[in-house]
Each structure stands twice: as structure tokens, then as C-alpha cells.
Amino acid sequence: MRCLLLSGLGPANINSPYLEGSLFAAETPERAREMLRRAGAPDLALGRLAFTQAGTEYALLRPRADTAPHLTTVTLLSILENSGHSFERVDLEDVWEGRAKAPVGDVDYVLLSTTYIWNGPILGAAVAWVRENLPGTGIVAGGQFTNLKFMSALRDHPEIVAVVRGDGEIALPRTLDALSGRGELSAVPNLVWRDEDNIRINPTEYVDIEDFPSPLVIGKQPIIPYESMRGCPFDCKFCSFPAASPKWRYKSAEKIRDDWIAYAERNAADSISAMDSTFTIPPTRLRRLLEILPGSGVPRWEGFSRANTINSAELVAGLEAAHCFQLHIGFESMNDATLKRMSKRVSVKQNRRAVELLSEGGLSYYGLFIVGYPGEDPGMFQDTQDYLLHEYSGHFALSKFSITDETMPLWQDREELQIVADDPTDPASPWSHIGMDSAQAARLQKETLDKVRLTNDKAVLSLWQHDYQHWLMPRHDHTTNIAVEKCLERMAMAPVDHADLDEGAAVVRDSLHRLKGFGVELAPPGRPLVCDPA
């Protein structure tokens, strides 16, 4: 049997309209060029900013050399490598962009990952590509979307012959075996399948992820995505993930350590990206990790955490000693009533304490906030805006609330909060509730981002940095790097922030002066700059 694996990210517009008109844009607008002329820097290009380290002149904005492969793809490739079945792979991003090509030769089945598919039309687009390029080929689907929507997927798309729900390590190879005549579909766990005109739902079984081998990665891979648990013990109402993976299981600290050392030795990995919703739980495992990771030879790592986990300076120091270099934390709101609506199970006091502890240490962190959660009105959101304006330090993101799925637990509050969505399956669809509507949330989002940039010297929007190496000046501390990014952000956004050209030119001059104080200056055009990791 020969299969085609379709996996990858969902369709997205990677160019944020928020940066349009700024120096971060691909082309510098005429208005911005005039502002630079008035600033006395007509040839200013962000790519010419440079600093010297150990006698070498580095570009400040060095393109990111390596990105983490998709966790789902890594897992599926490992399963298929061990299955004994021949397969090819096409990246779903190529499907969305219209450049995907079907492999030459016969394909018996298409294996479609729906982990990064979030509504029916997107699933339909993937199925249509199969129908057009591989007519008559059956599809076996699996992943987050079809975990929840397996019946509608089978109903709407006759090309889908089966759906693997939940764990695929055992179910997917056995499905392929049965489809090739070596076994019965009725005996495959976690499978929903067509039996002529009937839909059969087989019993669910869970893989013991502690005893089951972690995914095998082939070849050199500087950044390894990692999964240390499945499911989630929390019940945040904006997340439907627990419904798709209801049993919470996690790997031991010892298995994590051994896996990470193996990736470092086998794949030359120098960074691990833990993709779990919350890597720093349970507390007993975290304590054990902090005991055994220092000095173990594991690569540096990053992961997601809850705010209430970060509760002491000793814990932050322990994370650094254990080779953690960055945490992503969903603070969501700085209003206790909103946090309670979300069933977030943290308090504003715990959020504030986590930021205080992290800002005093050397650990990089990235805070996520939401505007417009159902029930939140502008007065309640003011608490979050005020915090970002006057207290927060470090990288942050502020997202406009979106309704991505009609199975989100927040629908339990539909009547009380008067939640209405034009299309509950489309994140871009307009919505409203008793507190505000999506248009008002978008205005508050932009207003807050603008105000924070102009007001708070210690808070930097995490948006444009993704394309560049982190940190920009890796031998300097967290505080210095935040200050450098803040100067860069204000200078690059000056054409957007200041209607008066001379006022914007003054910001450009001041930012260049401040950057010079950190050892960053404009290199003359034509001078080669090193873009390798500093």
C-alpha cells in the first residue's frame, strides 16, 4: 500500500495589517521616506542596524535560521516510518497556496491531518484538492477537527472512508493494515468507518505515552517539537481541546530528560519546544524536572505555563538552571470577574506576581492577553489595558476574542451572556455579547497596542520578532534586549504613530540615539554584516 500524507499548518495570512505603513513593511511608503529624510537618515533601513561582538559586526535583525517542524507532522512521520507502508508527503501549506503537486504513481489512500483545520470550508478545500488531483482516492482523516466533527466530516465528504479519533500510534497502522487486507476495520480501536451505508464507531483506547516510544526524528534538526502530555486537566471555557482529547496523561520527568538527551545526541538538537498546553504541571513532575535537568546535558527548552505556577524566585531560578530559556503564559485578563467567566482558575494577584518574578529574573517570557471575552465590557477590559500601560514588562500579545468552534464550553453561557455569532465555525466572523461586539473589541485592541507602544517603556508587542533570531543581542540581559526592541519598535512605527512628519522624525532621531547607547548603529550601505547566530 502507498499513501499520501497531507499535514501542516492551516491557511493564514502571515502579514499582519497592524504593521502596514511602518518600517517593518516590505516596502517603505513615500510618507515614511520623507520622515526619514527629515530625521537626517534618508538611507535608514532596519537591516543595516548592527552591533559589534568579539570583533565581528552582526546585523541586529538576523533572519531566523531554523524553525520548529510541526509536532503533528513529526508524530505522523514517525508512526508511518514504523508502519511498514510506503508513503509520500505533501505540505498542507502548499495546498492552501495552490502550489501542491500530487506524487507520481498510484496512491491508495490519502491520510489527512485536521489538527490545523478549524472549520468545514477549510476541510472541504483539502478534500477538493484530493478529489481534483487524486480522483477516486479514499481519505483517512484524523486530528483535532475530526476528533470533534467526525460525523459531519463523513456525512459531507464521501471521499472520507474513515476517521481515526484520538491516539493514532496503534490505530493508524492497524487501519492501513485492514485497508490493505490484513485485518478487519471493526477490530481497530479509535476508528469511525464506513460499512457500506452505515457508520461504525469502534471503542476508544488510549496509548500509554510513558511506555510508548516518543517520535523518532530523522536527520539533523536544530529545534525539536515535543509533546509531554495529552489532554488537559483544566476547563477554560474558550478552549475545546479537552473535549477532543478527554483523558489527561503525561510523561515522567525521567522520560522527558532521556528523550531530550537522545534528540541532542541523535539529531544535534540545541532547542526543544514543548508544545503542551501547560508544560509546568503537575507540580510533582515540575519539581522532579528541576532536580534532574541541571547538568544532564539536555538542550535549552521553552514551554507554556500557567501564571500560578510561577510563585517564587526560587522556582524561576530553578527553571533557568534546568535550561529553560522562555515561557509562554496565558494571563488572558487582569480582571478577576473576567477570569472567573473564563474558568481560568487563576487570579489577577497570581498573574501580577508571575510577571514580577519573571521580570526580576533572566528568563524570557511572553504574556498572552484577550480583549472581548463574553461578558467582558469596556470597563472590565480597562483593568487589562491599564495593567499593560503602566505595569507590565516584557513581550506580550493582545488578541481579539474569536469564536472558533460551536463546541467551545463558553456556549454554556449563551443565554446569560447573549452570545451571538454570525458563523460559530469562522474565527473572523462577527460576534456580540452583553459586554461588547467584535468591532468594538477590534477598536480596543488597536487602541491598547498603540497606547502601550507610546507609553510603556518596558512592554514590547510580540509580532514582528518572529522572523528574526531571539534574542537580538544574545550576550546582553533581558532588560537590555527589551529596551533595544522598544527603541526599534517606536522608530519603525513612527510613520504610523505620528501624523506630523517632523514629530515622527524627532522620534526616529531619538530612537537612533538611544540605540547607539546600547552599541547599535547604522552600518554604511555595502558593508557586509554577519547574520549567523551571535
Image (cartoon, rainbow, N blue to C red):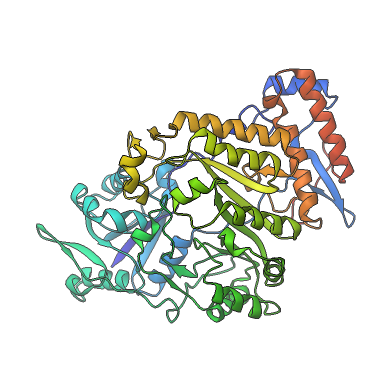
Asked whether 43 or 511 is in front, the reply is 511
> Could one spot residue 522 in this view of the protein?
no
Residue at x 34% of width, y 53% of height: 145
Asked whether 379 or 506 is in front, the reply is 379
Residue 412 is situated, as x and y percent measured from the top left of the image, at 32, 48
Residue at x 28% of width, y 51% of height: 134
Residue 119, by quadrant, is top left
> Could one spot residue 142 in this view of the protein?
yes
Residue 221 is situated, as x and y percent measured from the top left of the image, at 59, 65
Residue 461 is situated, as x and y percent measured from the top left of the image, at 65, 42
* Viewport quadrant of the C terminus: bottom right
State left or right for residue 30 relative to residue 219: right
State left or right for residue 513 relative to residue 86: right
Residue 374, compared with residue 210, is above or below; it is above
Residue 240 is situated, as x and y percent measured from the top left of the image, at 38, 54
Q: Residue furthest left?
A: 197
Residue 347, by quadrant, is bottom right
Residue at x 21% of width, y 76% of height: 182
* Viewport quadrant of the N terminus: bottom left
Residue 462, by quadrant, is top right
Asked whether 177 or 209 is in front, the reply is 209
